Structure formats: structure tokens, C-alpha cells
Amino acid sequence: MSKIDDAQDILRALQLPKMQQNELSALVLLVLGQLDETTPWGEAKRQALRIHDILQEIRARFGRVYAENTREAIRRSIIHQFEQARIVDRNPDQPGLATNSPRTHYALTDSAIRVIRQYGTASWQTAVSEFSSSARSLTEIYEHTQQRHQVPLTYRERTFHLSPGKHNQLQVAIVEQFAPRFVPQAALLYLGDTADKSFIVDDGALKKLGIPLTKHNKLPDIVLHDERNGRLFLIEAVTSHGPVTPKRRAELEDMLSGCPIACIFVSAFPDFATFRSFLREIAWETEVWLSEAPDHMIHFNGDRFLTDRS
């Protein structure tokens, strides 16, 4: 059999779902182990690779060409399942990398390397049994390591853990610093995480306000409901992209056409430097908040404060 057939046999033995036993999954496993058709299984080694690197290695080692637009499919349909099965680690060299970092990389776990090296030997079945029995405890260790780098969020005496990154750090600042200062009684109806687009969702409250429940992916990063004053705060956390532009405001207004209360649009930035880089994009009739100056807001809606002097 070819190395690809053998790799598929390994994936079956490690009890990967049928969808992760296909040729592409086998190729991903092989290049992560730095193996080609002539390399003995016993020489498998651990090499951290980005998804782009994986595609390049598949082409160089096996002559299979996959388009760059297959990267997300590999990430969602192969790598995620490999992670869950404790075959690969994400960002083992830099566990604090943001979820959406372009430097995100993957490497075979030490336990996966050990079992792969035994393929075709008399110790193979024993190695598979040892891998299967240790997978759960290894998962717990891995999750504990990952949690150390997560961003804690405290809301109404509950603690949530968001994935690492500046974007989620800013989201925490919005909930823990902006909200108590400017809308202290507001309820958090929605917060999206870079790794989970619907991390905190109050479906019942959103439905009551006429906000379509099927459009979570179109909501801003954070939605706060100030019920006492009849206002809805729609906040975009901006670290690298995504302030409330005229186009974005129009999209939100269209989506919230059935909402009966006033909507306040806010672009939140970590600092003045980031704010300045987006200054020309921000829509009029919106607000700006900077976490480095949490007691103040910048108003792009001055007519609200003008009086008739006639």
C-alpha cells in the first residue's frame, strides 16, 4: 500500500470519524509528520506548520495540488477534529497567539508521534491502545494549558473565558469599563468571540426587541440594552478592522428596522493610535470610545448638543 493508504489506516485505528479518514486528511497527517513515500514510519518527527505550509508540503512531497481557498476547509474539517482527537496541538510554540492570527500553526502531539512511529511493527496495537487510554487525560492537560492564555471576562458575578487576542481584550474592556461608566444598568445581550461568533447570546431578549435571531453573524461585536432609558448600544471592537462606517451603520439600521427603541452606534478602540488610523472611516451620528481613556467619549453627532439660538 502507499503511504497515503497507510495513513488512512492509522486514522481509522485512532478512531477518527469517517469524514476524517479521507485522502486529504491522510496527507495532512503525513506532512505534519514530515513523511513522504520513501520515509520510514519510524522517522516521523514533529514539525509545526501553518495551513499554508501544509498545502505547500503536500504539493512538494506528494505532488497533490490544492487551491489556497481550501485552507478554511482543512482547518474546519480536518485540523479541528485532529485537535479534538489529541493528534495535533494548536500553537504549541506560542499558545498565547490570537485565534485569528496569521501565525497560527499546528504540530503533531508527542503521543501521536509515538504511535505513528510504531505503525507496521509488532508494537503497533499496543501503541494504539496506549494512545486511546491516555487521550482523555492529555486533553485535560492541553485544555488547562490553553485556559492560562485565555482572556477572562467578569459579568454579573460570572466569569467567562474568551480566546486570546487584542480584540477580545478590548471586548472585555467594553463590558467591564465602558458599560459601568455610561450604561451601568445595561444588560449584555450579545458578545461574539473570535473563536465563537455567538459566545454570549440572550436569544429571548433579542427576539423581544425585534432583532432577527438568524443573523447573529451580522450583529456588531457587542450589544448592550439600556432598558431604563430605552436605548440599544451596538458596539464594534476595533483593533485591526471594523469600525462603524456609513456602510456598516446602514446595514445595522436595515437589520434592526423592527427594533422599537433608539440605537446608539459605538466604535471602540484600544488607544488613540488605533483610533487615528480609522478616523476617516467613522460614520457621522455615531460615538467613539477609547479604552485607554475610559472616562470619556468622542461624539460624531454634534447636532445633538446644539440649541436653537433664533
Image (cartoon, rainbow, N blue to C red):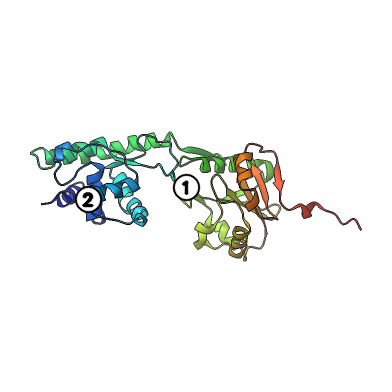
Residue at 65% across / 48% down in the picture?
279
Which residue position is annotated with label 1? 194
* Among the 4 quarters of the image, the one containing residue 251: bottom right
Give the number of marks: 2
Q: Which amino acid does label 2 sit on?
A: Ala
Circle 2 packing at 10 Å, graded few (<14), some (14-19), many (20+), is many
Figure check: 244 above or below 180: below
Residue 43's x, y, as percent? 17, 37
| Closest to the observer, 245 or 197 | 245
Q: Is residue 129 visible?
A: no
Residue at 60 percent across and 65 percent down: it is 254
Q: For numbered disc 1, what is the local secondary structure?
A: loop
> Residue at position x 54%, y 54% from top?
202
Q: In this view, does 93 lie to the left or right of 298?
A: left
* Quarter holding residue 117: top left
Left or right, 46 with respect to 213, comes to left
Question: As drawn, which residue projects farthest toward the right?
Answer: 310
Amino acid carrying mark 1 in the image: Thr
Answer with left or right where residue 299 lies relative to residue 11.
right
Instruction: For the residues labelled 2 and 1, say whether their Cβ atoms are less than 8 Å apart.
Output: no
- Marked residue nearer the N-terminal end (2 or 1): 2
Q: In which quarter of the image is the C terminus?
A: bottom right
Residue 137 image offset from top left, x and y in percent: 29, 36
Foreground label between 2 and 1: 2
Residue 215 in view of the camera: yes
Give the label on residue 303, or none.
Answer: none
From the viewer's perspective, is 249 left or right of 44?
A: right
Label 2: element kind: helix
Tell me residue 228's x, y (percent): 69, 52
| Image coordinates for residue 284, horizontal then vertical, percent | 69, 55
Q: Which residue is at 61% across, 54% downward? A: 244
Question: Which mark, residue 26?
Answer: 2
